[in-house]
Image: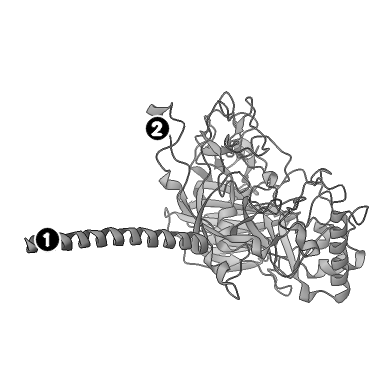
Amino acid sequence: MTGSVNSHTAGGAQQHEGVKETVESIFVALILAFIFRAFIVEAFVIPTGSMAPTLYGAHGTIVCSNCGTEFAYGVRDLADNRNVRLVRSNAVAICPNCSHVNSGLAINDEARNPESGDRILVLKWPLDIGGPGFSPSRWDVTVFKDPADGVTNFIKRLAGLPNEVLTILDGDVYTVPTEDLSEQTIAELEEIRHEKYELRTGKRRGLLRTTSKEATEELNQKLRIVRKTEEAQEELWRVVYDNDYPPQNRRPNQPIWKVYRGNTSGWDVSTRRIEFKDNGLEADHIVLADKPVDASISYNIYGRNVPAVQDQRVRLVFTPKTQDAEVRIKLEKLGRQFWASVSASGTVALFDSKSEPNDQSPAMIEKQLQPFPIDRSVQVTFENVDYVLTLKVGDKEVLTSSGDEKDKAYYAPNIAALRKPSTRRSAPPPRIFGHRGSFELTHLVVDRDQYYYHTHNSSALALSWGPPGGWASPGHPILLRDKEYFMLGDNTAASKDSRLWDVWGPHLEPRGEEFQLGTVPEDQIIGKAFFVYWPSPQRLPWLSSLKIGLIPDVGRMRWIR
């Protein structure tokens, strides 16, 4: 009897201890989860298309009915109560590849339930630690608090760092460290920043002044283009035309590789496999026709005036059919014509010439590689981006231009000329020349670079005193002080970012002049976005009545660059 009682008591104690340990384990797990979320990694959802196509907000997806290219278009999430423009019922989605107007599709957000935005993971702990090596880095995709309210989470690409002067010219970011500028120029920029504060608070009337001639001249001499990291640059290339997806029923306004010399040419562009056979004609080439190279993004279905983009890349697979086969790719920027030459003999070269180089033309830079075997395909890439020419053969960079003025391969921007209003209506398209021999080209793709720009619409900023183009426009460089950052959205035409911020929230008002419009204070930065862990889920066709997706699009899970 006693043993039975003792046994029951021991079992009850063990059961009590087991329940206690379980509760403690759950409690500890919740604490650890809270700590993990608060200080290490947190999940966020992308609400809008300001970072498209790098990251999607609420959107629909279409497969172009003419070329088969799949692409996303932005819509308003119906659960988002903010004043965001609705997609009209008669809106059209224009294919980014073949320019086909995919009309007749129910793409308005009332008739077609939008897919949710990408869900991402954000790394927070480096900022919590702080100090050298743990500060935010340029070109990181960054999450921070909206300066307008301090509550909404924004996501943009970090473009400007503390203690530098930043401006945007012809789609590129230019900076100079404040320590490299004269005391006079720094003092003037500080005065302009102070005027900006007084205009913001109503202590001053009028318009924000531009920099003086003297300060502008110094900036012209010292500003340097900020080149993107290799990872960010690869993310920021945008496809202009992929010849693997040609329009099946081509209309006059749709892209085509057009033969320059018509029926007398050695080119055959009738299929995806483009052929060239030398017939002795000089300057025999093909050109990408009927497709503007501009800053448009198909995600924006409203249609906007966008500038031409002259930073371009051509990718192709070169298959020599004769040992003397030689292909040349021409890219043009601001009147300068650059050529990349690749020969089956292994000779590769870059030229800066107003006409096609001949065998006696001096090269900017050249190199001898191992000859390419006949009928052996090799990937060739020629790019002109951020004032750097690069030729790649296979996955290796074989030639690149130089930033050294003493080098014959020197190539750099003229900042004073870039400040002048552009009258360019289009960008010269790429051209491909058959110099000699016979060869085939496959997987031919033209890309263009990311292009940040300012609209010159006077209503770009709601502030009557603000610069028409916004902060960091050519006439209004922005001085970034300690712990101030400048953010840009990848979808420039549809991103209200540092260029256009004209509202400040109550959480920033007490800081007074310490807060500057167009910047993000360091303590408002949450962290770096690094992974899309849950792209928009797929809906099941046989459950069309179900308004949510169930199957994650695993193929779009990816690292964020």
Q: Where is residue 405, by image quadrant?
A: bottom right
Residue 308 sits above or below residue 7 on the image: above
Q: Which residue is mark 2?
A: 540
Of circles 2 and 1, the one toward us is 1
Q: Position of residue 528 (x, y in %)?
A: 56, 60
Q: CA distance from mark 2 to mark 1?
A: 60 Å
Q: Which residue is mark 1?
A: 5
Residue that extends furthest to the top in the rendered view of this protein: 104
Residue at the (47%, 59%) spot, across then down: 34
Residue at the (52%, 34%) spot, across then down: 62
Residue 249 sits above or below residue 387 on the image: above
Q: Where's the C terminus, which quadrant? A: bottom right
Q: Give the colour scheme shown.
A: one colour
Q: Nearer the viewer, residue 458 or 397?
A: 458
Q: Are marks 2 and 1 in contact (CB under 8 Å)?
A: no
Q: Which mark is residue 330?
A: none
Crowdedness near tag 2: few (<14), some (14–19) or many (≥20) residues, C-alpha within 10 Å: some
Q: Residue type at mark 2: give it.
A: Leu
Q: Where's the N terminus, which quadrant? A: bottom left
Q: Residue type at mark 1: give it.
A: Val
Q: Is 503 left or right of 449, judged from the image as shown?
A: right
Q: Is residue 227 visible?
A: no
Q: Is 246 left or right of 496, judged from the image as shown?
A: left
Return the disc, 2 or 1, that comes first in the chain's sequence. Answer: 1
Q: Position of residue 127 (x, y in %)?
A: 58, 67
